[in-house]
Image (spheres, rainbow, N blue to C red):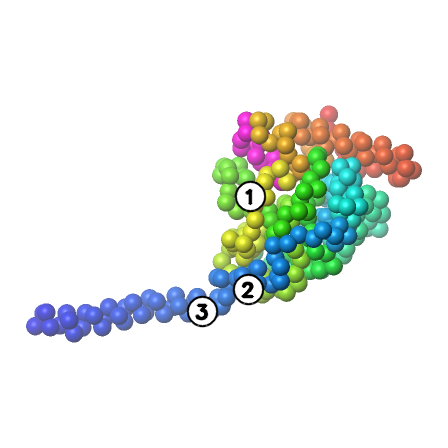
Amino acid sequence: MRHLWSSRYYLPALFILLGAVAFPAWRYYESLGQAHIPDPLSFYTSPFSATSNASRRAYATALYPTSSYLPGALLLGWSLHQHAMLAADVAQHMELLYTPGTLDEREKTWLGEVGWDMREVELIKPPESRKPAKNFQEQYTKLRLFEMEEFDQIFYLDADMLVVRPFPEIWSFPVPLAAARDVRKGFGWLPTINAGTLLLKPNRKLVEHMMEIAPTLRYNAVFAEQGLLQAYWAQAITHLPYVYNGQLGIKRVFPKIWQTVFQNDVKIIHYTGLKPWQWHEEPDMPVERCVWWEMWEKMLDWRRENGLSDLSDMASKPA
């Protein structure tokens, strides 16, 4: 009798139990639609091609929701020119994205004087129930870069970066999206990207789809657009060498590696953490701080020689 009960009732009961567990899980997966398997490459007719037309290439940076990074954006733009990154056969555009109310007319003039074309864009708010860290609330707006279809390639740099060596070869990378990996104190090297630099091919339909599925896509929402890009592009993203995103976090976590491997090769310094124009007492990274301030002084000299307004009071150099 016991054997008969187990064969007649145990198996059906087991199937019912498995169904009770699996059905909610299946319904959850179904509710995500295609969110788990996005294919960004499907939005491009030729994703792995680089343009040879320099007039279709643009550098970009962003300032929002405040102009607190204004000194950084000014010097970044000036450093691009100083390293011949705006040569006629390299790239011919510099685009600065800002949201309404971020900049006044005087600040826009200063930015234009170092080569930035001003582009006002609407803020992209975080998806509902996917709130990022407090200091990343506005960072989804960076995805506006994918809407700039008048360009074939865009190389984005955060406004707290400084070009210290030329890198014209970046434009020959035949990829739709590339970024360096992240480095963080307490964790070290990370498999996730740092969106401080992005080499990308604009595509308006792609970014529309990205934001459409963002509310249900599984990603680390704390890091806003950076987490979304990581999850959405997954295996399709190309990882740039750290020389194009020389995060000072590398030096904080691995000082010997920075000194022996990166210090003489980094082409773009990324001032993660305290910014040079915010350093006051006992600043860290004295070498990299001096690099920024030396170039800042050179920019001020250039402005004086060209009869432009004096910006020496904008950034207070620490003793």
Q: Where residue 231 appears, x then y in whole percent?
A: 52, 55
Which residue is identified by label 3?
A: 30
In magenta segment, residue 127:
no
Mark 3 vs 1: CB contact within 8 A: no
Q: N-terminal of the two: label 2 or label 3?
A: 3
Q: Residue at x 63, y 32 (%)?
A: 265
Which residue is identified by label 2?
A: 213
Count of picture labels? 3
**Location of residue 246 (image quadrant):** top right
Which residue is identified by label 1?
A: 181
Question: Range of the magenta residues?
Answer: 245-258
Mark 2 lies on a secondary structure that is: helix
Image quarter hosting the N terminus: bottom left
Q: Nearer the viewer, mark 3 or mark 1?
A: 1
Which disc number belongs to residue 167? none
Q: Given the current orientation, which residue lies at the most extreme top position? A: 319
The Cα–Cα distance between marks 2 and 3, rounded to whole angstroms, is: 13 Å
What amino acid type is highlighted by mark number 1? Arg
